[in-house]
Image: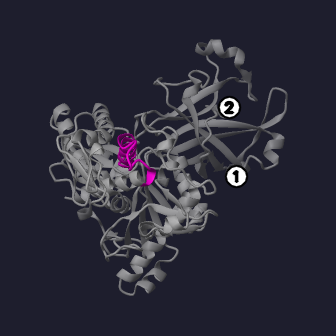
Amino acid sequence: MTSAQFRRPYTGASRKLVLALDVGTTYSGISYTILDPGEVPQIRTVTKFPGQNTSGADSKVPSVLYYDANGALQAIGQEAENLREDGETDENEWIRVEWFKLHLRPKNLYASDITDECIPPLPVNIAITDILADYLSFLFECAKEYIRTSHAAGDALLRSLEGSNDFVLGHPNGWGGLEEQRVRESAVQARLVPNMQAARDRIQFVTEGEASLYYCLEHGLSSDALKAGNKIMIVDAGGGTIDISSYLVKESHPVKVEEAASPDCRLQGSVFVNHRIEAFLFDKLKGSAYDDPEDIENIVRSFEKTAKRRFKSASEAVHIRFGSRADDDSDYGISKGILRLTGTEVASVFDPSVRAIVEAIQEQQSASGPIKNTLLVGGFASSEYLFNSLSRELTCHSKGMEISRPEGYTNKAVADGAVAFYLDNVVCSRVSRTTYGVKGLRKYKKKYHSRKPSGFRDASGSWMLPQAYHCLVKKNQKVRTEEELTMDFCRDWSESEFQDGSVHYQPFTIITYDGTSDCPQWTDVDSGSYHTLCTVHADISGAMPSMKPSKDNEGKRYYRFKYKLILVFGLVELKAQVAWMVNGQEERGPGTIVYLGDDKVPRASLTAL
């Protein structure tokens, strides 16, 4: 039984459009559903884009843009590729932008053999958020045009849906809150939503690994695989990243799963096979008539279209047709416009990606226990060599593991899966990727004797120690999707601070820890392992009227605010609130999370109770 078979009619009061935009490194896709009250939602895929030769030919569009020297967008998607084939982009000296998604990656997502130089640079006068905004705007317009022309009374349908659109955007497993914030900023700029508050309300994110899980639940998993207690692994092999996610089936009717290990992400997607073959060809053809960049680029493009997908084994030669019958140089393996490479040579450009995937799979198994069913999805999954190599390696080194490719695995797994994620809510718990907490103060105890000289007496007379770390959730901790993790804190304000109103909106900084300690206590121990994740800006103005002043040891009035910091870690995104008590009743203030990308640990500002 698939998750779709348990899907219930939409219970909302009015019609709504849900769009999933999958911005990929090399290709992108769009899926959607129109929610009608009382109707069971159906997932649909956009299969027509500007510049495609035949209607309904493909559910993906190139993630390519061209800009002029002034930074003005000139071409995008398949139309951009068509103009390139016609020579117009070169004639106009437009600047090609590709693989732009990789410029959004976090600093900690890297591979030993891949440097920034491996990724095509952006134009100097255009920010990555501007490029993403242009591309999101393009996808949004493509979606609207497809709905307009593919549905009866499409214009009227779109008018009825205006202002009610929700969006789901997929991103690699290795991305976090900072990257999501930048995507939201681009979405506002692209006019998907009017402002950042609407972006927070109407844009959801799902990891590419989890979106692929939802796709596989509908297209690739048997009822046997979905028996309670079984584990499944999803390997989303895309253009830029390899995303690996493992799940334990908790219930079969309806399907409920939980993460069995922290999801993994490797920077070893299919574009790096292209990068390695390009470097190999420059070396192989050095000194020939074909060692200039244009010829090498032409050969790589021919390799991409044919040999890259068909290549199966290091024991078979590869022939790449790139020129005319007049192109002939036997010293370099070129005959009648065809370059001959040995299977070993071609295998060498695939193998770093194969090794990275095998290593990641083995690490997932080490963390989660044996997993029998592994599903390979994504554009890179179409490589026969990749599939055969993984099958062979996993059969040899992971007893009982079977790898398969579900129907339609290359084009639309993330986009379709993102819509299913919005509808079905199958994942009931997730595994924390790192340790989360806050920096603050800690009451002195005898066991902290060595730290006593660094302490001070607070307004109430207690001896407090700075540099304390208060852990909210530990690395690899399993957290239910709606579970609230709380910790009690307090803050003291002077009379003047309280009266001037500046304390109504309070910042709370969330700090991650990636060191080796199971229970980190102090931020000045292993200090390089602490990093600022984000700041929660909380509206606590509702607490002000109920607060009563106290007097410190010098008779000065001060106000103490006792509160709970509430974080929800089990969702794809971190959520935060602040709660306090008024006359025995809990009240809450909303928390807005801002990611600054700042690795500095802030000064102590919180006191644990």
Q: How is the image coloured?
A: one colour
Residue 602 badge: none
Residue 192, visible in the rendered structure: no
Q: Earlier in the sequence, mark 2 or mark 1?
A: 1
Judged by depth in the image, the label closer to the viewer, 2 or 1, is 2
Q: Residue at x 45, y 69 (%)?
A: 83
Mark-to-mark CA distance, 2 and 1: 22 Å
Q: Nearer the viewer, residue 526 or 343?
A: 343
The C terminus sits in image quarter: top right
Q: Which residues are magenta?
A: 268-294
Query: For the residue marked with disc 1, what is the amino acid?
Result: Ser
Residue corresponding to mark 2: 604
Q: Nearer the viewer, residue 277 or 209?
A: 277
Q: Amino acid at mark 2?
A: Ala
**Residue 505 in view in this figure:** yes
Residue at 36%, 58% (x, y): give it. Answer: 421
Question: Within the magenta stretch, is there residue 282?
Answer: yes
> What residue would you read off at disc 1?
541
**Relative to the observer, which residue lies in front, 509 or 589?**
509
How many other residues sit within 10 Å of disc 2, few (<14), some (14-19) or many (≥20)? some
Q: Horizontally, is 110 left or right of 530 in the view? A: left
535 lies above or below 55: above
Q: Is 581 placed left or right of 473 in the picture?
A: right
